[in-house]
Image (cartoon, rainbow, N blue to C red):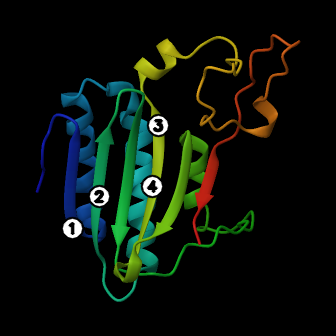
Amino acid sequence: MISNPRRHCTVELQALPSRIGQVRRIVSAQLRYWHMDPLIERATLGVTELLSNVHRHARPDKTCTVEMELLLDRLTVSVRDHDPRLPVVEDADPLATCGRGLAMVAAVSESWGVRPDGDQGKVVWFTLPTATATATRPATVPRLTTGEPAHRLVEVGAVSHPADDLTPAHAPARSAVVG
């Protein structure tokens, strides 16, 4: 089921291997429709990893919902399942054949996280910047002035002092685990 194809897309499914391939094709088609072709590879990789986690770990069932929301500056992809257990990110053994899914999501995304969904389970999400966000991003970190609202979140490594005029280096993907 796809709803409001302009800016929002929702797909409900059983996280089975055959269905994961179908969702990848739906995500690709939706991003092409939105003219967001540069995001297809990273979005399909991320959604594949999240759905694989549902298939492998979710209890009591494999029913889940994939949502994509396109805002001006970012695409948010989320997977909601019925298992209230939050994922634990651990270092995978170098020879392990699994255990790297969330690390891959972190590597390809701008940010990612997980939040409980009440008694209904949890939502695992990631964001990708759109080309619009990249084109409109300022070259330097904006300075806070007295007339400007102070609600912007900045990573510790990207803070600019008034005397500095530095371009922030690319920061690693961040996670936000609510709990």
Tally the numbered discs. Answer: 4
Residue that mark 2 sits on = 66
Foreground tag (2 vs 1): 2
Q: Residue furthest right?
A: 163
What number is the disc on residue 125? 4
* Label pair 3/4, CB-CB below 8 angstroms: no
Disc 3 on helix, strand or loop?
Answer: strand
Foreground tag (3 vs 1): 3
Q: Amino acid at mark 3?
A: Leu
Quadrant of the image occupied by residue 65: bottom left
Pointer 2 or 3: first along the chain: 2
Q: Position of residue 17 (x, y in %)?
A: 31, 67
Residue that mark 3 sits on = 128
* Label pair 2/3, CB-CB below 8 angstroms: no
Pointer 2 or 1: first along the chain: 1
Kindly identify the residue that appears in the image at 44 percent across and 77 percent down: 56
Distance between mark 3 and mark 4 Cα atoms:
10 Å
